[in-house]
Amino acid sequence: MSQELFKNDIVKKIVEKSRVIWALDVSDSLMGWDIEVSMPQEGAMERGMARAELQAIGQSILKSPELRSLVEEAEKRIEELNDYERGLIRVLKRRIKIATAIPEDLLKEYFKTTSEATIQWRIARSKSDYGIFKPYLEKIVDLMKKFAEYLGYEEHPYDALLDLHEEGFKTRDADRIFNVLEPGIRRTLSVIQIKGLYKPEHELEKVEYNVEDMKNLNLELLKIFEYPLGVRSRFDVSTHPFTTSMGIRDVRITTRYEGKDFKRSMYSTIHEYGHALYELQIDERLSGTLLATGVSGGMHESQSRFWENIIGRSRVFAEAIYPIIKKHLKFVEKYTPEELYYYFNTVKPSLIRVDADEVTYNLHILLRYKLEKAMITGDVKIGELPEVWNSEIERLIGVRPKSDSEGVLQDIHWSSGLGSFCNYTIGNIIAAQIRKHMMKKIKIDEEIMKLNFKPIREYLKEKVHIWGSTYEPKELLKRSFNEEMNPIYLLEYLEEKYLKV
Ligand code: MG
């Protein structure tokens, strides 16, 4: 299989040596899937121990002089290597660097602090009392500053943290993106609100459904998308929907059933399908190597949001799947496809990120980005955070939190560190960018109307999926679309959809 792509003798040795790391990744994913989907409640502690033991094996292999010298050897001949071989060396170097940069004592302190912080965050949020969480966040920010120093950076300490979540993404990139997005999104939002173009809520949000009916609707949508259920994939239920893969022939998604407001379950399913498709369409010849997975969180999110928003929330999709929805959910009969479209696309400045619509979503990320950067540079004191949060979100979306749980305490993310939020906006931007390029080749609306998604899947495969992690995100964009990440496409998409009604 992989021999066809990896020809260099040293790289072949590296493929063999690193296969155990791949196998440990697979085991960890499978154990993670099991925790969310089927593990009995009391299994958590032993499962945690088992995972930590296996992770330690992976770390020691990454740190081993043997593997490192092979990688160094391959690097000396980098000019002779093909793109796949270079990709493998890049991915491995990055993992070795992350495994070796942080001293073990510091890493232990990090795990101890963050597991306590997660518990304290839950208590703080339920009591809406930031004071409970504050000392933990202070420790975590200190740890993050130390991490940045050990990992190293060229321009900004926050770059080191961003890079952990999105390879090659820098503070400079984030500033460039948000400087364009902020005024554009706020302009669009205010026009929608002044003209009343989209409703803030819809009565279907309160309508209850039968879980079995909803499941059948989700299954039929997955069938239309040609999700290879049972053959190379699964579809289960979990509290927080997610996607995981145990190789490119075993990709699994979950959804959840809240019992009302059926779009929630439907869009969770479509979102995770987008993630799954990325993994399913990776070049089979990469199977069993460290390149056989999506290249980054941001690129992955671009795929899920492409299916969820660009396709799933389009007017034509609402029209095309209307008969299917009506078949499974009888109460939809009294609504027109047009009304369904407005139910799918409410616009309401919400204080809670996870409830935010397409228009306001990235303003929530901007807020978190600004605050994280300021925490790292010391421009904002941890004690002032709730006040700064409240003023800034009010400035951005016009609503002010009445409590810490509606503000600074709403996300779990900071109890395990900083740097992950930008991935969501990266995903939204790249999804809109791909749409624009795809439109030159495919009549997207016509294909959606026919429920023929094959040309769309093929396009995504050729431009993004097939490469796995061969190219780093910035290079993949350059190669496939001949340009860098460009936030203008997202603004244009939002204006087209929300203002030209
Ligand atoms: Mg996602």
Image (tube, grey):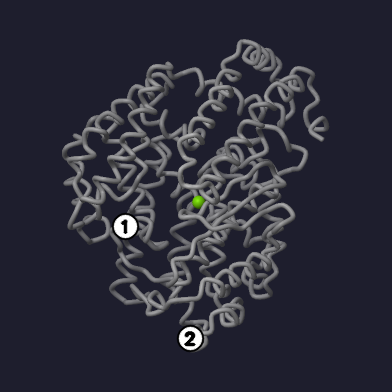
**Type of residue at label 2?**
Tyr
Percent across and percent down for residue 310 are 54, 63
Report the side of 331 relative to 284 (left or right).
left
Percent across and percent down for residue 365 are 36, 49
Q: Is residue 67 above or below residue 384?
A: above
Determine the secondary structure under disc 1.
Answer: loop
Mark closer to the chain start, 1 or 2: 2
Who is closer to the viewer here, 10 or 326? 326
Who is closer to the viewer here, 237 or 468? 237
Percent across and percent down for residue 441 are 68, 60
**Type of residue at label 1?**
Ile
Q: Residue at x 46, y 53 (%)?
A: 240
- Res. 156 in view: no
Distance of mark 1 from mark 2, alpha carbons? 28 Å
Which numbered marker is on residue 300? Answer: none
Mark 2 CB near ligand 1 (8 Å cut): no
Q: Is residue 414 above or below residue 160?
A: below
Name the residue tied to disc 1: 352
Who is closer to the viewer here, 210 or 223? 210
Q: Is residue 345 above or below residue 12?
A: below
Who is closer to the viewer here, 343 or 128? 128
Name the residue tied to disc 2: 335
The quadrant in which residue 231 appears is: bottom right
Q: Residue at x 35, y 76 (%)?
A: 199
